[in-house]
Amino acid sequence: MEAPFAVALVTSVKETPYTKDLSGRLQKARKELGGKLFFDVLAKQLIDLDTTSSFPPKDKNALNELVETIHEQSSVKKLNQACLTYYLFLDFPPELTMGDNLPQYYAEEIDFPVGFKELVQGFWHLDRLEFDQSLVHLSHPLVTPTFHDKILSAYLTATSGKHNYVMAYLCANNPKLASQETITNYMATLCAVSLYSGLEFSRSASPDIKLDLLTSMVEFCLENSPMRNLWRLVNLPLNPIEENLMYNNVLAGIISNAKSEQHKSLAKDVLLMRSLHTGNVSLAYQVSQMTNSTTSTPAENVSWNDLSRGLQLHIA
């Protein structure tokens, strides 16, 4: 009975909520979210339907057809169909339904579980880049979120407070950090709060990803307020294993392979300052010769040539 009910319900509303303005905002959000809305991801996951070209619907007939398509597959779980239908009904304002709350009415009639209701509302708000509201729903105690990578990536598109959203989501849901993307996003968030927090996280991770985490930390410093963060990086209390990875793998790799000349130069500076900071004068001398180029970024009135000669005299 749910399929005819959903189709009859959407057909009974004479106008579509997908105005030119709303459709434009959804298409813009799709680009912001990496080419797929959460509705697209849900439709593909739940009923194996590609909606990147059919959502938002271009007119009322297209909307009716989309709802019919969602419910025409008898092999699909009713709950999966209900999730997508409820999402669509959230777009209907009361003025189109004679003051009725269409999504609430639909949810009550089919006894839609609260946890799924909150989850879909969270995704619905994310598709509108309404991050505060989405977090309220995704943090509901009855919600078990999926698509953690995409959720974290969505929060990182926020123009302000993005790392706060990520931390709040992770604290509320405690998802397993299984994918490289999730781990990298979490590392960036920790580094935004404190480089030491990022370092502590790298120490708690398995050895096989420690190098990746340290690399993520350095890349974060290079891309975000480098003059401030690189100084903090220079003074991090690394243990011998971390120091070796930092010297021989992370910084050396950036110096050799980074596409940005500025990143190469900054990595050289960090390598030089850390070697001086730890008393590795021999390495400092090697780096000072390496940084004698037009891309180096020495402090004002400091000559790499003079520094190199001074270190050479110290070694001798």
Image: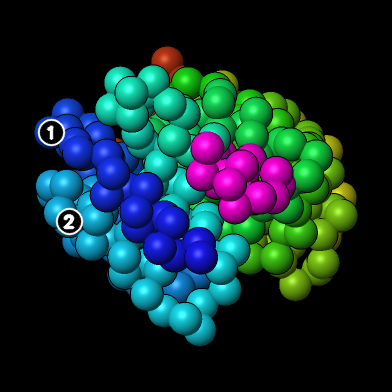
Q: CA distance from mark 1 to mark 2?
A: 14 Å
Q: Residue furthest top?
A: 301
Decide whether residue 101 is among the magenta residues: no
Direction from residue 19 to residue 74 in the image, left or right:
right
Q: Residue furthest bottom?
A: 75
Decide whether residue 108 is among the magenta residues: yes
Of badges 1 and 2, the one in the foreground is 2
Amino acid tagged 2: Ala
Mark 1 — residue? 20
Query: Which sits earlier in the primary sequence, circle 1 or circle 2?
Result: 1
Q: Which residues are magenta?
A: 105-122
Q: Residue at x 39, y 20 (%)?
A: 99
Whether residue 157 is situated above or below residue 7 in the rendered picture: above
| Of residues 138 and 287, the one drawn nearer to the viewer in this rendering | 138
Which labelled disc corresponds to residue 280?
none
Q: Residue at x 51, y 29 (%)?
A: 131
Mark 2 — residue? 62
Q: Is residue 43 visible?
A: no
Q: Residue at x 43, y 26 (%)?
A: 100
